Image: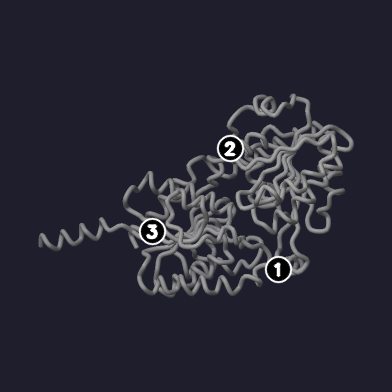
Amino acid sequence: MMEREKGREGEREKVKRIFVSSGELSSEMHAEMVLRAFAEKYPGQFTFFGLGGEVSRAAGLDLIENIVDRAVIGFSEAVKNLGYFRKLLGRIDAMMARGEMDGLLLIDYPGLNLHIARLAAKHNLPVVFFISPQVWAWRKGRAKTLARRIKKMLVLFPFETAIYESAGCPVEFVGHPFVDRVVPAESRGAARKRLGLGETDTLISLMPGSRRQEVSRHFPVMWEAASLLARERPLAVMIAQARTIPSGFYRYWMQSAPPNLKAFLLADERQRHTLVAASDLALVTTGTTTVETMLLGTPMIAGYRLSRLSYLIARLLVNVKYCAMPNILADAPVVPELIQDRFTPRALADEARRLLSDQSRRSAMRALLADTAAKLGPKGAAGRVAAAAAGVFLHA
Protein backbone atom coordinates (compact mmCIF):
# COMPACT_ATOMS: atom_id res chain seq x y z
CA MET A 1 0.00 0.00 0.00
CA MET A 2 2.80 2.42 0.91
CA GLU A 3 4.59 1.69 -2.39
CA ARG A 4 1.41 2.36 -4.32
CA GLU A 5 0.98 5.74 -2.59
CA LYS A 6 4.60 6.63 -3.32
CA GLY A 7 4.04 5.77 -6.97
CA ARG A 8 1.03 8.05 -7.14
CA GLU A 9 2.96 10.83 -5.45
CA GLY A 10 5.81 10.42 -7.94
CA GLU A 11 3.34 10.61 -10.80
CA ARG A 12 1.92 13.83 -9.40
CA GLU A 13 5.39 15.31 -9.09
CA LYS A 14 6.42 14.43 -12.64
CA VAL A 15 7.53 17.50 -14.58
CA LYS A 16 5.25 18.02 -17.57
CA ARG A 17 7.01 18.51 -20.90
CA ILE A 18 5.04 21.05 -22.93
CA PHE A 19 5.64 21.74 -26.60
CA VAL A 20 5.10 25.42 -27.46
CA SER A 21 4.64 26.86 -30.94
CA SER A 22 4.54 30.58 -31.71
CA GLY A 23 5.53 31.62 -35.19
CA GLU A 24 5.92 35.37 -35.49
CA LEU A 25 6.95 38.35 -33.42
CA SER A 26 3.47 39.32 -32.21
CA SER A 27 2.63 35.80 -30.99
CA GLU A 28 6.17 35.54 -29.65
CA MET A 29 5.47 38.46 -27.32
CA HIS A 30 2.39 36.65 -26.00
CA ALA A 31 4.43 33.46 -25.56
CA GLU A 32 7.01 35.35 -23.53
CA MET A 33 4.40 36.68 -21.09
CA VAL A 34 2.71 33.29 -20.69
CA LEU A 35 6.00 31.45 -20.11
CA ARG A 36 6.96 33.95 -17.42
CA ALA A 37 3.52 33.54 -15.81
CA PHE A 38 4.02 29.75 -15.75
CA ALA A 39 7.43 30.18 -14.09
CA GLU A 40 5.88 32.40 -11.42
CA LYS A 41 2.72 30.37 -10.74
CA TYR A 42 3.99 26.80 -11.26
CA PRO A 43 7.73 26.72 -10.51
CA GLY A 44 9.35 23.39 -11.31
CA GLN A 45 6.16 21.75 -12.61
CA PHE A 46 6.67 22.31 -16.33
CA THR A 47 9.44 22.44 -18.91
CA PHE A 48 8.87 24.10 -22.26
CA PHE A 49 10.43 23.45 -25.65
CA GLY A 50 9.46 24.03 -29.24
CA LEU A 51 9.12 26.68 -31.93
CA GLY A 52 9.53 30.43 -31.57
CA GLY A 53 12.35 32.95 -31.54
CA GLU A 54 14.86 34.65 -29.31
CA VAL A 55 12.18 36.40 -27.24
CA SER A 56 10.59 33.15 -26.08
CA ARG A 57 14.03 31.56 -25.63
CA ALA A 58 14.88 34.34 -23.17
CA ALA A 59 11.64 33.54 -21.31
CA GLY A 60 12.63 29.90 -20.81
CA LEU A 61 11.71 28.08 -24.01
CA ASP A 62 14.17 25.39 -25.14
CA LEU A 63 14.14 26.47 -28.76
CA ILE A 64 14.36 23.61 -31.25
CA GLU A 65 13.67 25.79 -34.30
CA ASN A 66 13.63 29.55 -34.76
CA ILE A 67 10.68 30.15 -37.07
CA VAL A 68 9.99 33.77 -36.16
CA ASP A 69 12.49 35.03 -38.74
CA ARG A 70 10.76 32.86 -41.35
CA ALA A 71 7.21 34.02 -40.57
CA VAL A 72 5.26 34.39 -43.80
CA ILE A 73 1.99 36.06 -44.73
CA GLY A 74 -0.39 35.45 -47.59
CA PHE A 75 -1.19 32.42 -49.70
CA SER A 76 1.45 32.86 -52.40
CA GLU A 77 4.18 33.45 -49.81
CA ALA A 78 3.20 30.30 -47.88
CA VAL A 79 3.43 28.15 -51.01
CA LYS A 80 7.11 29.09 -51.42
CA ASN A 81 7.85 27.70 -47.93
CA LEU A 82 5.83 24.46 -48.19
CA GLY A 83 8.88 22.19 -48.32
CA TYR A 84 10.34 23.66 -45.13
CA PHE A 85 7.09 23.38 -43.18
CA ARG A 86 6.43 19.82 -44.37
CA LYS A 87 9.82 18.73 -43.04
CA LEU A 88 9.18 20.58 -39.79
CA LEU A 89 5.80 18.89 -39.32
CA GLY A 90 7.40 15.52 -40.02
CA ARG A 91 9.96 16.21 -37.33
CA ILE A 92 7.26 17.19 -34.82
CA ASP A 93 5.21 14.09 -35.69
CA ALA A 94 8.24 11.90 -34.97
CA MET A 95 8.79 13.62 -31.61
CA MET A 96 5.18 12.93 -30.68
CA ALA A 97 5.51 9.29 -31.70
CA ARG A 98 8.57 8.94 -29.44
CA GLY A 99 6.61 10.29 -26.48
CA GLU A 100 8.74 13.41 -26.06
CA MET A 101 5.89 15.69 -24.96
CA ASP A 102 3.01 15.59 -22.47
CA GLY A 103 0.98 18.40 -24.00
CA LEU A 104 1.03 21.32 -26.44
CA LEU A 105 0.47 25.05 -26.07
CA LEU A 106 -0.15 26.50 -29.53
CA ILE A 107 -0.08 30.30 -29.74
CA ASP A 108 -1.63 32.03 -32.74
CA TYR A 109 0.06 31.33 -36.15
CA PRO A 110 -2.80 29.11 -37.41
CA GLY A 111 -1.19 28.35 -40.77
CA LEU A 112 1.21 26.01 -38.94
CA ASN A 113 -0.46 25.43 -35.60
CA LEU A 114 -3.66 23.95 -37.02
CA HIS A 115 -1.53 21.23 -38.63
CA ILE A 116 0.32 20.64 -35.37
CA ALA A 117 -3.05 20.28 -33.58
CA ARG A 118 -4.05 17.63 -36.13
CA LEU A 119 -0.88 15.64 -35.40
CA ALA A 120 -1.42 15.97 -31.65
CA ALA A 121 -4.97 14.58 -31.96
CA LYS A 122 -3.56 11.57 -33.81
CA HIS A 123 -1.24 10.90 -30.88
CA ASN A 124 -3.91 11.65 -28.21
CA LEU A 125 -1.94 14.58 -26.79
CA PRO A 126 -3.78 17.40 -24.96
CA VAL A 127 -3.69 20.73 -26.78
CA VAL A 128 -4.43 24.21 -25.50
CA PHE A 129 -4.76 26.79 -28.27
CA PHE A 130 -4.23 30.40 -27.25
CA ILE A 131 -5.37 33.15 -29.67
CA SER A 132 -8.03 31.85 -31.97
CA PRO A 133 -7.68 31.61 -35.73
CA GLN A 134 -9.92 34.28 -37.25
CA VAL A 135 -12.89 31.94 -37.63
CA TRP A 136 -15.19 34.97 -37.36
CA ALA A 137 -13.68 36.27 -40.61
CA TRP A 138 -13.41 33.14 -42.72
CA ARG A 139 -13.81 29.34 -42.57
CA LYS A 140 -16.05 29.17 -39.50
CA GLY A 141 -15.99 25.38 -39.88
CA ARG A 142 -12.51 25.39 -38.36
CA ALA A 143 -14.14 25.89 -34.96
CA LYS A 144 -15.79 22.45 -35.21
CA THR A 145 -12.54 20.93 -36.45
CA LEU A 146 -10.68 22.41 -33.50
CA ALA A 147 -13.35 21.09 -31.12
CA ARG A 148 -12.29 17.57 -32.16
CA ARG A 149 -8.57 18.24 -31.82
CA ILE A 150 -7.98 20.41 -28.78
CA LYS A 151 -8.87 20.42 -25.09
CA LYS A 152 -9.40 24.16 -24.75
CA MET A 153 -9.44 27.37 -26.76
CA LEU A 154 -8.32 30.56 -24.99
CA VAL A 155 -9.51 33.70 -26.77
CA LEU A 156 -8.45 37.35 -26.72
CA PHE A 157 -11.79 38.90 -27.63
CA PRO A 158 -15.19 38.39 -25.95
CA PHE A 159 -17.17 37.97 -29.20
CA GLU A 160 -15.16 34.81 -30.01
CA THR A 161 -16.59 32.72 -27.17
CA ALA A 162 -20.03 32.24 -28.76
CA ILE A 163 -18.48 30.83 -31.94
CA TYR A 164 -16.62 28.08 -30.08
CA GLU A 165 -19.46 27.34 -27.69
CA SER A 166 -21.78 26.72 -30.65
CA ALA A 167 -19.15 24.41 -32.14
CA GLY A 168 -18.92 22.39 -28.91
CA CYS A 169 -15.35 23.49 -28.19
CA PRO A 170 -14.37 24.31 -24.57
CA VAL A 171 -13.47 28.00 -24.61
CA GLU A 172 -12.46 30.72 -22.16
CA PHE A 173 -12.16 34.46 -22.68
CA VAL A 174 -8.85 35.33 -20.99
CA GLY A 175 -8.47 38.89 -22.28
CA HIS A 176 -5.49 40.48 -23.99
CA PRO A 177 -1.97 40.34 -22.47
CA PHE A 178 -1.17 43.68 -24.07
CA VAL A 179 -3.37 45.35 -21.45
CA ASP A 180 -0.43 44.70 -19.09
CA ARG A 181 2.38 45.08 -21.58
CA VAL A 182 1.51 48.19 -23.57
CA VAL A 183 2.16 51.00 -21.09
CA PRO A 184 4.11 54.26 -21.66
CA ALA A 185 7.34 54.49 -19.66
CA GLU A 186 7.03 58.26 -19.20
CA SER A 187 4.70 61.17 -19.83
CA ARG A 188 3.98 62.72 -23.23
CA GLY A 189 5.81 65.90 -22.25
CA ALA A 190 8.91 64.07 -20.98
CA ALA A 191 9.09 61.88 -24.09
CA ARG A 192 8.84 64.86 -26.42
CA LYS A 193 11.41 66.84 -24.46
CA ARG A 194 13.88 63.96 -24.74
CA LEU A 195 13.52 64.14 -28.53
CA GLY A 196 13.91 67.91 -28.56
CA LEU A 197 10.24 68.41 -29.49
CA GLY A 198 7.77 70.87 -28.04
CA GLU A 199 4.13 70.24 -27.16
CA THR A 200 2.88 71.76 -30.43
CA ASP A 201 5.39 70.02 -32.73
CA THR A 202 3.81 67.39 -34.97
CA LEU A 203 4.93 63.82 -34.20
CA ILE A 204 3.76 60.80 -36.20
CA SER A 205 4.57 57.16 -35.43
CA LEU A 206 5.16 54.75 -38.32
CA MET A 207 4.40 51.12 -37.40
CA PRO A 208 4.83 49.01 -40.55
CA GLY A 209 4.65 45.54 -38.94
CA SER A 210 7.11 42.85 -37.88
CA ARG A 211 7.35 40.35 -40.72
CA ARG A 212 9.70 40.90 -43.65
CA GLN A 213 6.99 40.92 -46.32
CA GLU A 214 4.84 43.27 -44.25
CA VAL A 215 7.61 45.79 -43.66
CA SER A 216 8.84 45.73 -47.27
CA ARG A 217 5.32 46.51 -48.54
CA HIS A 218 4.20 48.96 -45.88
CA PHE A 219 7.17 51.01 -44.74
CA PRO A 220 7.95 52.65 -48.12
CA VAL A 221 4.30 53.76 -48.39
CA MET A 222 4.31 55.19 -44.85
CA TRP A 223 7.67 56.88 -45.38
CA GLU A 224 6.60 58.49 -48.67
CA ALA A 225 3.38 59.70 -47.04
CA ALA A 226 5.36 61.28 -44.20
CA SER A 227 7.70 62.87 -46.76
CA LEU A 228 4.73 64.40 -48.57
CA LEU A 229 3.44 65.89 -45.32
CA ALA A 230 6.91 67.20 -44.44
CA ARG A 231 6.92 69.30 -47.60
CA GLU A 232 4.03 71.26 -46.10
CA ARG A 233 5.08 71.51 -42.43
CA PRO A 234 7.92 70.59 -40.06
CA LEU A 235 7.39 66.98 -39.03
CA ALA A 236 8.97 64.40 -36.72
CA VAL A 237 8.42 60.68 -37.18
CA MET A 238 9.14 57.75 -34.90
CA ILE A 239 9.79 54.54 -36.84
CA ALA A 240 9.07 51.31 -34.99
CA GLN A 241 11.84 48.91 -35.96
CA ALA A 242 10.94 45.22 -35.75
CA ARG A 243 13.53 42.97 -34.13
CA THR A 244 13.39 40.76 -37.22
CA ILE A 245 14.37 43.55 -39.66
CA PRO A 246 17.92 44.97 -39.98
CA SER A 247 18.12 48.70 -39.26
CA GLY A 248 19.81 49.20 -42.65
CA PHE A 249 16.49 48.60 -44.42
CA TYR A 250 14.87 51.60 -42.71
CA ARG A 251 18.00 53.76 -42.91
CA TYR A 252 18.13 53.29 -46.68
CA TRP A 253 14.79 55.11 -46.94
CA MET A 254 15.65 57.62 -44.22
CA GLN A 255 18.48 58.96 -46.40
CA SER A 256 15.84 60.55 -48.62
CA ALA A 257 14.26 62.60 -45.81
CA PRO A 258 13.28 66.12 -46.90
CA PRO A 259 14.74 69.02 -44.84
CA ASN A 260 11.60 69.41 -42.69
CA LEU A 261 11.46 65.73 -41.69
CA LYS A 262 13.17 64.59 -38.51
CA ALA A 263 13.19 60.78 -38.08
CA PHE A 264 13.93 58.52 -35.09
CA LEU A 265 14.39 54.74 -35.43
CA LEU A 266 13.47 52.76 -32.31
CA ALA A 267 13.68 49.04 -31.58
CA ASP A 268 13.17 49.25 -27.80
CA GLU A 269 9.57 48.31 -27.06
CA ARG A 270 9.02 50.48 -23.96
CA GLN A 271 10.44 53.57 -25.68
CA ARG A 272 8.27 52.82 -28.70
CA HIS A 273 5.13 52.63 -26.58
CA THR A 274 6.06 55.89 -24.91
CA LEU A 275 6.54 57.70 -28.20
CA VAL A 276 3.39 56.27 -29.78
CA ALA A 277 1.47 57.59 -26.77
CA ALA A 278 3.19 60.96 -27.25
CA SER A 279 2.33 61.08 -30.97
CA ASP A 280 -0.38 63.12 -32.62
CA LEU A 281 -1.07 60.30 -35.07
CA ALA A 282 0.10 56.76 -35.90
CA LEU A 283 0.26 55.09 -39.31
CA VAL A 284 -0.13 51.36 -38.62
CA THR A 285 -0.71 48.01 -40.25
CA THR A 286 -4.04 46.32 -39.53
CA GLY A 287 -2.71 43.60 -37.23
CA THR A 288 -1.42 43.61 -33.67
CA THR A 289 -0.16 47.18 -33.95
CA THR A 290 -3.75 48.46 -34.02
CA VAL A 291 -4.32 46.85 -30.60
CA GLU A 292 -1.12 48.41 -29.21
CA THR A 293 -2.00 51.83 -30.58
CA MET A 294 -5.58 51.59 -29.31
CA LEU A 295 -4.36 50.80 -25.79
CA LEU A 296 -2.05 53.83 -25.96
CA GLY A 297 -4.97 56.01 -27.03
CA THR A 298 -3.31 57.44 -30.13
CA PRO A 299 -5.40 58.34 -33.21
CA MET A 300 -4.41 56.13 -36.12
CA ILE A 301 -4.84 55.25 -39.77
CA ALA A 302 -4.66 51.53 -40.55
CA GLY A 303 -3.44 50.16 -43.86
CA TYR A 304 -2.50 46.84 -45.38
CA ARG A 305 -1.29 45.41 -48.67
CA LEU A 306 -0.85 41.78 -49.76
CA SER A 307 0.59 40.33 -52.95
CA ARG A 308 -1.93 40.53 -55.79
CA LEU A 309 -2.62 36.77 -55.74
CA SER A 310 -3.00 36.63 -51.94
CA TYR A 311 -5.40 39.55 -52.00
CA LEU A 312 -7.58 38.05 -54.74
CA ILE A 313 -7.83 34.76 -52.82
CA ALA A 314 -8.56 36.62 -49.57
CA ARG A 315 -11.39 38.54 -51.26
CA LEU A 316 -13.00 35.23 -52.18
CA LEU A 317 -12.67 33.69 -48.71
CA VAL A 318 -12.86 36.47 -46.14
CA ASN A 319 -16.19 37.90 -45.03
CA VAL A 320 -15.68 40.89 -42.71
CA LYS A 321 -16.76 44.51 -42.74
CA TYR A 322 -13.49 45.77 -41.23
CA CYS A 323 -9.82 44.82 -41.08
CA ALA A 324 -8.49 46.86 -38.13
CA MET A 325 -9.19 45.33 -34.72
CA PRO A 326 -10.62 48.51 -33.11
CA ASN A 327 -13.23 48.59 -35.88
CA ILE A 328 -13.96 44.87 -35.54
CA LEU A 329 -14.36 45.14 -31.75
CA ALA A 330 -16.58 48.22 -32.00
CA ASP A 331 -18.37 46.99 -35.15
CA ALA A 332 -17.99 50.56 -36.39
CA PRO A 333 -15.43 52.61 -38.37
CA VAL A 334 -13.49 53.93 -35.37
CA VAL A 335 -10.29 54.36 -37.42
CA PRO A 336 -9.82 54.89 -41.18
CA GLU A 337 -8.71 51.86 -43.20
CA LEU A 338 -6.75 51.94 -46.47
CA ILE A 339 -6.55 48.42 -47.89
CA GLN A 340 -4.61 47.12 -50.92
CA ASP A 341 -4.84 49.56 -53.87
CA ARG A 342 -6.15 52.33 -51.60
CA PHE A 343 -2.98 52.07 -49.49
CA THR A 344 -0.82 54.59 -51.36
CA PRO A 345 1.45 57.42 -50.16
CA ARG A 346 -0.92 60.08 -51.53
CA ALA A 347 -4.07 58.57 -49.99
CA LEU A 348 -2.31 58.01 -46.67
CA ALA A 349 -0.95 61.57 -46.62
CA ASP A 350 -4.39 62.99 -47.48
CA GLU A 351 -6.07 61.06 -44.66
CA ALA A 352 -3.32 62.05 -42.22
CA ARG A 353 -3.65 65.71 -43.19
CA ARG A 354 -7.39 65.64 -42.50
CA LEU A 355 -6.82 64.18 -39.03
CA LEU A 356 -3.91 66.42 -38.11
CA SER A 357 -5.88 69.54 -39.04
CA ASP A 358 -8.95 68.53 -37.00
CA GLN A 359 -8.31 68.43 -33.26
CA SER A 360 -11.95 67.63 -32.46
CA ARG A 361 -11.89 64.58 -34.75
CA ARG A 362 -8.72 63.30 -33.08
CA SER A 363 -10.24 63.83 -29.63
CA ALA A 364 -13.38 61.95 -30.66
CA MET A 365 -11.25 59.07 -31.95
CA ARG A 366 -9.31 58.94 -28.67
CA ALA A 367 -12.57 58.60 -26.75
CA LEU A 368 -13.82 55.81 -29.03
CA LEU A 369 -10.50 54.00 -28.75
CA ALA A 370 -10.67 54.14 -24.94
CA ASP A 371 -14.21 52.69 -24.94
CA THR A 372 -13.19 49.93 -27.35
CA ALA A 373 -9.99 49.07 -25.45
CA ALA A 374 -12.10 48.34 -22.36
CA LYS A 375 -13.44 45.28 -24.20
CA LEU A 376 -9.99 43.65 -24.04
CA GLY A 377 -10.55 42.68 -20.41
CA PRO A 378 -8.69 43.48 -17.17
CA LYS A 379 -5.00 43.09 -16.44
CA GLY A 380 -3.56 39.64 -15.74
CA ALA A 381 -4.39 37.84 -19.01
CA ALA A 382 -1.07 35.94 -19.16
CA GLY A 383 -1.69 34.56 -15.67
CA ARG A 384 -5.18 33.44 -16.69
CA VAL A 385 -3.72 31.69 -19.75
CA ALA A 386 -1.16 29.88 -17.58
CA ALA A 387 -3.84 28.83 -15.07
CA ALA A 388 -6.22 27.54 -17.76
CA ALA A 389 -3.46 25.66 -19.61
CA ALA A 390 -2.02 24.19 -16.39
CA GLY A 391 -5.48 22.93 -15.48
CA VAL A 392 -5.56 20.97 -18.73
CA PHE A 393 -1.97 19.65 -18.62
CA LEU A 394 -1.92 18.65 -14.95
CA HIS A 395 -5.11 16.62 -15.28
CA ALA A 396 -4.49 15.10 -18.69
Q: Amino acid at mark 2?
A: Arg
The quadrant in which the N terminus is found is bottom left
Does 170 appear above or below 182? below
383 in relation to 316, above or below? above
Quadrant of the snapshot with the C terminus: bottom left
Q: Is residue 348 at all visible to an observer of this figure?
A: yes
Looking at the image, how many numbered discs can be counted on the residues?
3
**1 or 2: mark nearer the eye:** 2
Label 1: few (<14), some (14–19) or many (≥20) C-alpha neighbours in 10 Å: few
81 or 285, which lies in front?
81
Residue 32 spot, x, y in % from top left: 49, 49
> Which residue in the protein does label 1 denote?
317
| Callout 3 crowding tier (Cα within 10 Å): few <14, some 14–19, many ≥20 | some
Label 3 to label 1: alpha-carbon separation: 33 Å
Residue 220: image location, x then y, percent: 78, 51
> Is residue 152 shown above or below 187?
below
View extreme (right): residue: 232
- Please name the residue that numbered disc 2 is placed on: 270
Q: Amino acid at mark 3?
A: Val
Return the disc, 3 or 1, that comes first in the chain's sequence: 1
Which circle's residue, 3 or 2, is located before the other in the chain? 2
> Which residue is at a point 73% across and 46% down the rendered structure image?
251
Q: Residue 249 appears at what percent x and percent y?
A: 71, 51
Could you give the CA–CA distance between mark 1 and mark 2, rounded to whole angstroms? 37 Å
Q: Is residue 315 left or right of residue 155?
A: right
**Type of amino acid under label 1:** Leu
Report helix, strand or loop for mark 1: helix
Query: Which mark is in front, 3 or 2?
Result: 2
Residue under label 3, please give it. 392
